[in-house]
């Protein structure tokens, strides 16, 4: 049974969000400590729809050394799931590769549950940092500041049943991934 999802934002509305800042943060990089979170969009909501339309079907995400350390806990050999970086990524940084893809371009760890019509990540607790942040990205602005922005191509953005993206949401769902970037 395929689930039909009607996105909460149309393409034109999503494109308006392309450089949308959700929050600004100040931090102590040395201690990997967030000092202040200033919410810029007080009405913004998010809830993963488990549709995997954009996040998991557009090629494998970048994997860095910390990601590899997490992925090692799955017991898989890195050669089974990592391939070299073959294209330029803006935030390549310390990339050691990308997750391999299936023939259809989706992540090798993406699983479909036919009984529910939903997708899930086969390595959810060990997934790469970029996946842990999606559909957001954290951009460093110097040594003490950063901005949390939305990546506009996600069906969970401003979903009516979504959680408000406030300080609590950021602390609960994104803070560990952000600290890893610091």
Image (tube, rainbow, N blue to C red):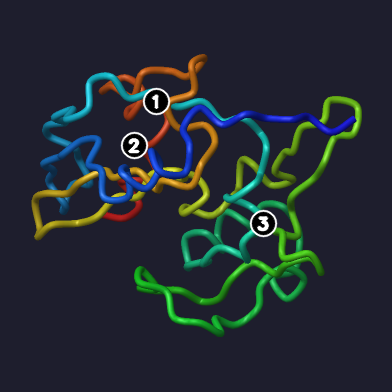
Pick the residue in front: 155 or 88: 155
Q: Tell me if mark 2 has few (under 14), some (14-19) or many (20+) residues whose alpha carbon lies within 10 angstroms of its own.
A: some
Pick the residue in front: 178 or 14: 14
Mark 3 lies on a secondary structure that is: loop
What's the CA distance linking mark 2 and mark 3?
25 Å
Could you tell which of marks 1 and 3 lies nearer the N-terminus? Answer: 3
2 or 3: mark nearer the eye: 3
Identify the residue shown where x is 78% and y is 29%. Answer: 3
Identify the residue shown where x is 45% and y is 43%. Answer: 135
Identify the residue shown where x is 60% and y is 48%. Answer: 126
What's the CA distance linking mark 2 and mark 1?
7 Å
**Which residue reaches farthest top?**
161
Mark 1 lies on a secondary structure that is: helix
Pick the residue in front: 100 or 21: 21
What's the CA distance linking mark 1 and mark 3?
26 Å
Q: Residue 26, labelled with which disc?
A: none
Residue wearing tag 3: 57
Q: Position of residue 75 (x, y in %)?
A: 75, 57
- Check contact, mark 2 vs mark 1: CB within 8 A: yes
- Check contact, mark 1 vs mark 3: CB within 8 A: no
Residue wearing tag 1: 172
Residue wearing tag 2: 175
Q: In the image, is 124 to the left or to the right of 114?
A: left
């Amino acid at each position: 049974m395929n689930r039909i999802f009607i996105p909460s934002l149309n393409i034109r509305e999503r494109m308006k969000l392309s450089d949308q800042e959700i929050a600004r943060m100040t931090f102590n990089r040395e201690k990997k400590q967030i000092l202040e979170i200033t919410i810029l969009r007080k009405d913004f909501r998010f809830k993963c729809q488990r549709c995997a339309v954009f996040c998991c079907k557009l090629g494998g995400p970048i994997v860095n050394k910390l990601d590899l350390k997490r992925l090692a806990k799955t017991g898989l050999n890195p050669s089974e799931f990592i391939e070299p970086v073959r294209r330029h990524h803006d935030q390549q940084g310390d990339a050691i590769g990308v997750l391999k893809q299936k023939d259809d371009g989706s992540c090798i760890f993406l699983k479909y549950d036919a009984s529910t019509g939903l997708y899930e990540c086969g390595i959810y607790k060990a997934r790469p940092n970029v996946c842990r942040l999606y559909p957001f990205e954290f951009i460093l602005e110097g040594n003490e500041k950063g901005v949390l922005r939305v990546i506009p191509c996600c069906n969970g953005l401003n979903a009516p049943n979504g959680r408000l993206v406030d300080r609590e949401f950021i602390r609960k769902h994104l803070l560990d991934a952000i600290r890893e970037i610091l």
